[in-house]
Image (cartoon, rainbow, N blue to C red):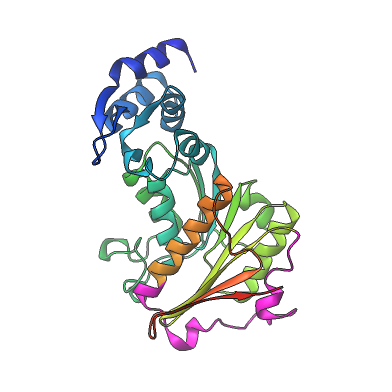
Amino acid sequence: MRPELINGIKRLSVKAAYPDGDTYRSISTKDVSDLSSGHGVFGREIEIAALESDIVPERYARNMKMYSLEDQTALLRASVSIVGLGGLGGGVTEILARIGIGTLHLIDGDHFEDSNLNRQFLSGMNRLSVSKAQAAMERVGEINPSITVHHHREFLTEKTGDRLLGRPDVLVDCLDSLYTRLVLEKFAKKIKTPMVSAAVAGGSGHVTVIFPDDPGLKMIYGDKVDPSMKGAEASLGCLPQAVTLLSSIECSEVVKIILKKGTLSRNQLIVVDLLDNSFETLQLV
């Protein structure tokens, strides 16, 4: 980072206080945006430089009691690919953009329909027939323009995976197709990248974390899946409260992988049923 930018960050920083009274140096979202556009530098680079100078970008101030300056820097340096941008994917996109994941790859070849309105946060009356990937990119820009976004209006297939997925730190499975979920796992193992997988059906769902050497999805679905086979969502529907909860758990696992903190649901299955308020963790291996 050029010295004049570092000096600009320090000059624009101000003293601020957390709700508990602890003080810190802060730089506003507007000042980050102005420095970014004025110097032709990505906003996340400005924010990383601020954090390395012990200055908190104000948009992340409420992260700081749980995460350190170094943690927030790691999140901004991280790259995550989200495959499927419907209910789960919309929630994951929203949360990861707000928490400050620096680069997002957003992948979905679908467009919004009326039936998506009950649960898919990226949808709206003004976005019916709009590409989900396009809507996701626009939403991230509204939330956090410091983030770098690569959006792909294509479906993941065995032929497109190498080109669409890139080389992220984490892959997030937000798909509603069992077969495509297995395709994603195949690429995750190929590029040696951990994957967070979730599925929702009615008011229930599950989440798991898979590392490249783990047995993974076959422990849940078996060795073979018919390409035409539909998930349980097809027969049970999909409630917005379940989608929101499961997408939040997925994001929690993503952040723990990046920061190497906390307990992961690796080789485990977190099973949630909101109808009877049950939360179980099943051991897969």
Give the camera-side residue of 37 and 214.
214
In the rendering, at what x and y percent does residue 5 appear? 41, 16
In the picture shown, does residue 186 fall above or below 42? below
Answer yes or no: is residue 134 visible: no
Answer yes or no: is residue 69 visible: yes
In the rendering, at what x and y percent does residue 28 appear? 28, 30
When asked about the image quadrant of residue 209, the answer is bottom right
Residue at 29% over, 19% down: 12
In the picture shown, does residue 170 fall above or below 120? above
In the picture shown, does residue 49 fall above or below 262? above
Q: Is residue 218 left or right of residue 46?
A: right
Q: Is residue 120 left or right of residue 253?
A: left
In the rendering, at what x and y percent does residue 58 appear? 31, 34
Residue at 34% over, 28% down: 32
Is 224 magenta? The answer is yes
Residue at 26% over, 23% down: 14
When asked about the image quadrant of residue 117, the answer is bottom left
Is 182 magenta? The answer is no
Q: Quadrant of the C terminus?
A: bottom right
Q: Main secondary structure of the magenta part?
A: loop
* Tag count: 0
Q: What range of the chain is rendered magenta?
A: 213-242
